[in-house]
Amino acid sequence: MRKIKFLLVVCLLGMAATASAQFANAKGSSNSASSSALENWQSIKVSYLPASFKGDGGGDIGFKGAMVSYQKGFAVSQSIPLFVETGLGFSWIGGEIEDTGIDLNFFSLNVPVNFGYKHAFSDKVSVAPFVGITLRGNLFGNYKYEGESLNAFDKDEVGEELQVKRFNIGWQVGVGINFNALYIGGSYGSDFNDIVEGGKAAVPQITLGFNF
């Protein structure tokens, strides 16, 4: 966790330093920032989520997952390529809880709000580091054990320790690379609040997308 916090701080400082330099250069030249980095955009993305639940007492429970999302980026300056990106994603996370015989599946809606810096090397290639938060509403899910399906959100069926919370808020830090309309990105994030009692979700993402 200390390494992740350090990475988050480095990313923020890096974006701030780059933005300051860009702003200084912008005073002397109106062409200092590529026009392609100052435009709004939309994208459709597909992500692989090798998620895990991290317990307060240590130890991780690994899961697999996927997400399909729509996102829109908004330039926030006419001279500095800073952006805000938000959207809506539908995700699935599931798999067997190791050594228990219990399978978990649940589906969520995700609303990210990212702040970043888009550096264009040319009109076709750019790199965009970002940090942000995600609001996640867990819609429905179940545990399966010995042929029986149990509602993952019903405390009476699964008990307080295994009950999945309906709402989570988390953070993420990552970077995206754009090649023409193709997007390739990676990020890592975790929840601020528990998704189950005494456990938070950690969610790396590997993403492919199409910008338009």
Image (cartoon, grey):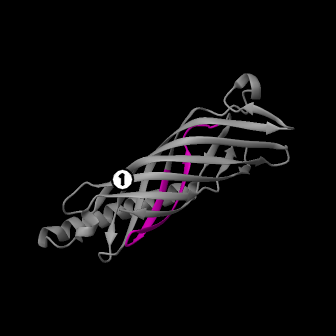
Q: Quadrant of residue 104?
A: top right
Q: Residue at x 58, y 32 (%)?
A: 166
Specify whether 100 is left or right of 5: right
Closest to the observer: 175 or 96? 96
- Extreme-top residue of the structure: 156
Q: Residue at x 29, y 75 (%)?
A: 123
User: Where in the figure is residue 7, as x and y percent of width and height?
Assistant: 50, 60
User: Where in the figure is residue 177, as x and y percent of width and height?
Assistant: 43, 69
Mark 1 = which residue? Answer: 72
User: Where in the figure is residue 22, as x and y percent of width and height?
Assistant: 24, 68
Give the number of callouts: 1
At mark 1, the secondary structure is strand
* 180 within the magenta span: yes
Which segment is the magenta one?
Answer: 172-195
Crowd class of label 1 (few under 14; some 14 to 19; many from 20; radius 10 Å): some
Closest to the observer: 71 or 22? 71
Q: Residue at x 69, y 31 (%)?
A: 163
Amino acid type of the residue tagged 1 in the rendering: Lys
Regarding residue 56, the answer to whether it shows in the image is: no
* 194 within the magenta span: yes
User: Where in the figure is residue 111, as x and y percent of width and height?
Assistant: 45, 44
Closest to the observer: 32 or 87? 87
